[in-house]
Amino acid sequence: MAYVALLTGVLAGCSEGADDKKDAKTSASASASAGQVAESGDSIGAAGSACELPVSFDLAKDWEAEAIDSAAAQDKASPTDSGDLEDEISEEVLDSLLRQGPVAAACEVDAKPAGYIGFLRIWTGEPGDDDARTVLEEFVAAEDDSSKAKYSSFTSGDLAGVEVEYVVTSELLDETKKESAFAVTTPDGPVVVHLGGMDTEEHEKMAPAFELAKKTLQKV
């Protein structure tokens, strides 16, 4: 199930062994940096794609997408009539992973097949009056230990959006790392595309995939 991959992916981002990271760095291109655009592979968003969304965009070559059914995942984790504490904790953990601010996880794109350790995650929300900047601010505010957010506007085709670059502090690793996200609003609700990564170095290597998604973004 994709929501299990989301959970294990988040945990793996903090616990991947040194050998895995070394292998990923060896196979990754050292020249990748923010501002560059990755080579296109599959696209997602349109009907029949791996993840059906209110928008579509290209994925970097070899990155693999899988849809996340947040509602189904949370239903499976709902507490039983017995009121079992373990069930209640599971629901809280899943909710924290499957929802962030005004949006819920809808798709996870794994970078490991391309030689990186990280994910591009897509979050969607219900239609409303909030603009892209408001949605993105609430998304960042909902992430624990986030700071130094820098927002800017962008356009892609007939879509206007807002992007942000910020840092989060990992209590487990006792270090900060860079993260990026962008948001657009559509008649079907807001969409947030987020790029994390094991650390800032890995994030910057994956940044061309994030730029590709933003550059090829369009309405479905």
Image: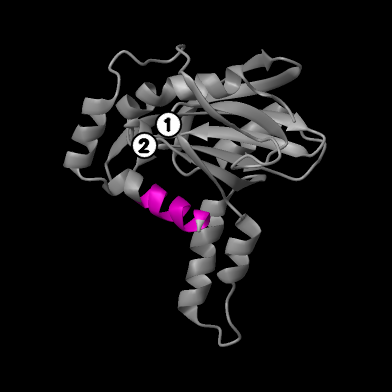
Q: Which segment did they paint magenta?
A: 2-11
Residue 93 makes an appearance in the image: yes
Residue 94, position in %: x, y? Answer: 52, 60
Label annotation for residue 113 = 2
Element under disc 1: loop
Q: Is residue 188 magenta?
A: no
| Residue at (46% x, 11% y) in the render | 35
Quadrant for residue 137, please give it.
top right
Mark 1, residue position:
62
Going from N to C along the chain, the mark reached first, 2 or 1, is 1
Residue 113, position in %: x, y? Answer: 36, 36
Task: Provide the major secondary structure of the magenta segment.
Answer: helix
Q: Is residue 213 left or right of residue 220?
A: left
In the rendered structure, which amino acid carries the disc numbered 2?
A: Pro
Q: Is residue 192 left or right of residue 11?
A: right
Neighbourhood count class around disc 2 (C-alpha, 10 Å): few under 14, some 14–19, many 20 upward? few
Element under disc 2: helix
Residue 150 makes an appearance in the image: no
Q: Please, which residue is most extreme toward the front here?
A: 48
Position of the C terminus, as image quadrant, is top right
Q: Is residue 118 left or right of residue 26?
A: right
Residue 218, position in %: x, y? Answer: 70, 23
Label annotation for residue 169 = none
In the rendered structure, which amino acid carries the disc numbered 1?
A: Asp
Q: Are marks 2 and 1 in contact (CB under 8 Å)?
A: yes
| Residue at (76% x, 16% y) in the render | 158
Residue 133 vs residue 32, the one in the foreground: 32
